[in-house]
Image (cartoon, rainbow, N blue to C red):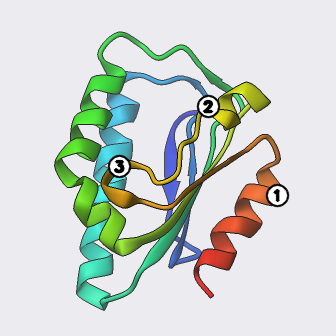
Amino acid sequence: MPASVDLTSWPLIRAVQGGRLTVEEADSLAAGLSEVLDRARAEDTRFAIVVDQRDRQAPQKGALEGIHAFWAEHAEEIARWCCGYASAVATQELADLVVNPGPGGLVVFGSVDYEEALSWAKSRLE
């Protein structure tokens, strides 16, 4: 499944990053997050994100650099507007790598259970 950002449940953002992340998909994810930040500012609304990465594979060369650069450039703003970032991953070892707080003080959560990650993200909006 390709990378995508779904805003239909605003202010709950659902994203997917499955398979091998390409440079184009990474750019699309960064553009999606930029759109989310623009909307949060315009509506003065905080949001939560749940990302399904359970089927993630090794990224294409250069794919992570762009998305990491975007996060580094906007870390404080993301942390200000995002009240929680949950990541559903394939193994407990990967979930254990999620360190709270994340970039810019972002509140983060990692799990191998998508429903648990989704529930956590929803609870951050309450």
Q: Nearer the viewer, residue 90 or 92?
A: 92
Q: Earlier in the sequence, mark 3 or mark 2?
A: 2
Left or right for 104, reference 95:
left
- Snapshot quadrant of residue 46: bottom left
* C-alpha gap between disc 3 and disc 2: 22 Å
Instruction: Give the secondary structure at mark 1.
Output: helix
Residue type, numbered disc 3: Pro
Instruction: Give the secondary structure at mark 2.
Output: loop
Residue type, numbered disc 1: Glu
> Residue 103: which disc?
3
Note whether residue 36 is visible.
no
Left or right for 38, reference 101:
left
> Residue 18: which disc?
2
> Residue 51: which disc?
none
Query: Which residue is located at x 50 percent, y 46 percent?
Result: 4
Instruction: Give the secondary structure at mark 3.
Output: helix
For this orientation, the residue located farthest to the left is 73
Query: Which residue is located at x 50 percent, y 78 percent?
Result: 11
Mark 1 lies on residue? 115
Q: Nearer the viewer, residue 22 or 96?
A: 96
